[in-house]
Amino acid sequence: MKRHIGLFMRSLILVVLLCGTASVAHAANSYVRVSVTDDPVRTNGQLIDNAHSKYPFITYGGITYLPLTWDNAKALGLSLSWDADAGLHIDSASSPAYGTSAGWTKPAFKQDLSASRLLPASYTAAKSTYPISIAGASIDNSLEEYPFLELQGITYMPLTWDLVHDRLKLTIFWDPENGLNIIGGQRQVLGNIVFDDENDLYISPSLVPAAGPGILVKVSKSLADKPVWLSKAESQQVQEQIKQTRLADPSRGTATEVEEREDGLYYKGLKLLEKTEMADPSGVSSKVEFSGTLFQLDGKRSLLAVQKRFVYTSNSRLEGFLYLYSEGKATLLDKLQRVPDKVIPNEDGSYWIATYMQDRTSFNISQLDQLDTYGRLHNMNIAWNKLGVIMVGLGNSSPDFGESGYANPQTEDDRIFVQLTPYPLDGERPMIEAGLYAVDSAQNLTLLSEPVPESAQLYVSSDKQLYSLGERVNTIRNISTGEAAMWYDYELLEAE
């Protein structure tokens, strides 16, 4: 049964009133005048009817206060608990959900509109006297400039930046037209951008509605229109476009055969590895497998990547070798954990080589190299002292749509986008600041933005615009133009 947190406190308040022995001066300091104004206040974008709400939002000292009713807490994803000894504890119920699920319905936000008042209105509220903790940290309410308050048996929480943003991880902002808006408890509906055309982005959802196919969501690149769910047939057409575009992408390389002989590993009769180099030095693996990928550079040269896979009982481990192959000769350039994901040509004759890897400490490591016009390899991780240098546009795998990073991510002015992670490769050397950058073939970096969280997706569109999805829940940002749009989960899914 739904219950307000205030109901759990009424017995405590009565005990305090009956048993209190404080001085008259202290009692006077325990009460404050609060206001209910007609300034707009919204919860997840939905306007609060303060004129008719049984438990309205109030203001004290210029700060807006949230009534901690069951419905408000549920809408904002807050967890409330009460104990006679420990008092009130407030926490975020959970982080935004990113898992995939079908047939989910958004619970509707309900307001108790059983009251009627003329605005502005004024009331007397009491300062809360029981223990209070926020996200595990105790608050001394008697010392707070904006204390927790009691009105009509309901606890009111001040919407200060420290409490709301820093501790409870909610979003709060104000604008002159829409007033104050507090956002929380949102589900991540938009999953990953998997394709784009001249006008639209196509997104695979993390959540799908109870009714309808829910296979793909279309969002206008202007970010001005509400997202549209595609039908099954429309989604299949997009899937086919993704497949054909990926097949036509020359930057991904093609599979090629390498030959295992008694004395070593060969490519077109050219020995690449000695027999001793082919074995597992630990002797633990049950077998070792080899495969090759060829990246055509020009009419005379190619990059040959050899993948070496150690197969164990329950898993496998990768090791790789990158060769420059030209006129029947193969020169070892570097040892990699895995085959490069993309090789991108520059107008000056150099090439970017982007590889996603994972090391033994489970750090996600992305490596970026540049092959210069003389055939020399330059490692950007070393040059910029970064554990991870992520070239945007590598793509991420989807069981329904394959790799989304199919397009050549290079801009018309011969630049690529990279994200530099915060971690240094060498703690003794200075490093480049973490963030999103554009980099040209001369290795010059131009800072575009702060780093995007690991949970968010970066995407380069066919018109070379850089987008992020999921920096905030259901938010798409065009980093190239500075435009952004956010949709509430109830706008994307059916509500009860």
Image: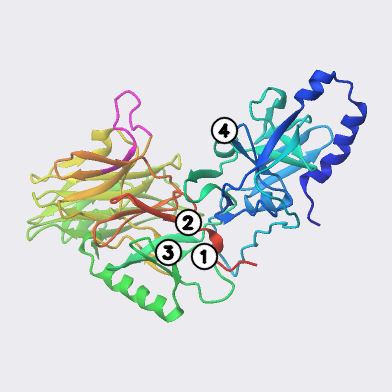
Q: Give the main secondary structure, helix, strand or loop, of the magenta stretch.
A: loop
Magenta stretch holds residue 210:
no
Q: In whole angstroms, how far apart are the C-alphas of marks 2 and 3?
A: 19 Å
Residue 4 image offset from top left, x and y in percent: 77, 48
Are the residues at dot 1 and dot 2 in contact (C-beta closer than 8 Å)? yes
Quarter placement of the N terminus: bottom right
Q: Quadrant of residue 195?
A: bottom left
Are the residues at dot 2 and dot 4 in contact (C-beta closer than 8 Å)? no
Are the residues at dot 3 and dot 1 in contact (C-beta closer than 8 Å)? no
Q: In whole angstroms, how far apart are the C-alphas of marks 4 and 3?
A: 38 Å
Q: Nearer the viewer, residue 217 or 265?
A: 217
In terms of sequence position, does the residue under pointer 4 or pointer 3 come before the other?
A: 4
Residue under label 4, please give it: 162
Q: Which mark is residue 229?
A: none
In terms of sequence position, does the residue under pointer 4 or pointer 1 come before the other?
A: 4
Residue under label 2, please give it: 474
Are the residues at dot 2 and dot 3 in contact (C-beta closer than 8 Å)? no
Q: Secondary structure at mark 4?
A: helix
In terms of sequence position, does the residue under pointer 2 or pointer 3 come before the other?
A: 3
Q: Which mark is residue 492?
A: 1
Density class for disc 1 (Cα within 10 Å; few <14, some 14-19, many ≥20) is many
Compared to residue 446, the image places residue 404 above or below, namely: below
Q: In whole angstroms, how far apart are the C-alphas of marks 4 and 1?
A: 30 Å
Q: Secondary structure at mark 1?
A: helix
Badge 1 amino acid: Leu
In terms of sequence position, does the residue under pointer 3 or pointer 1 come before the other?
A: 3
**Residue 334 visible, this orientation:** no
Badge 2 amino acid: Asn
Q: Nearer the viewer, residue 163 or 258?
A: 163
Q: In whole angstroms, how far apart are the C-alphas of marks 1 and 2?
A: 9 Å
In terms of sequence position, does the residue under pointer 2 or pointer 4 come before the other?
A: 4
Q: Secondary structure at mark 3?
A: strand
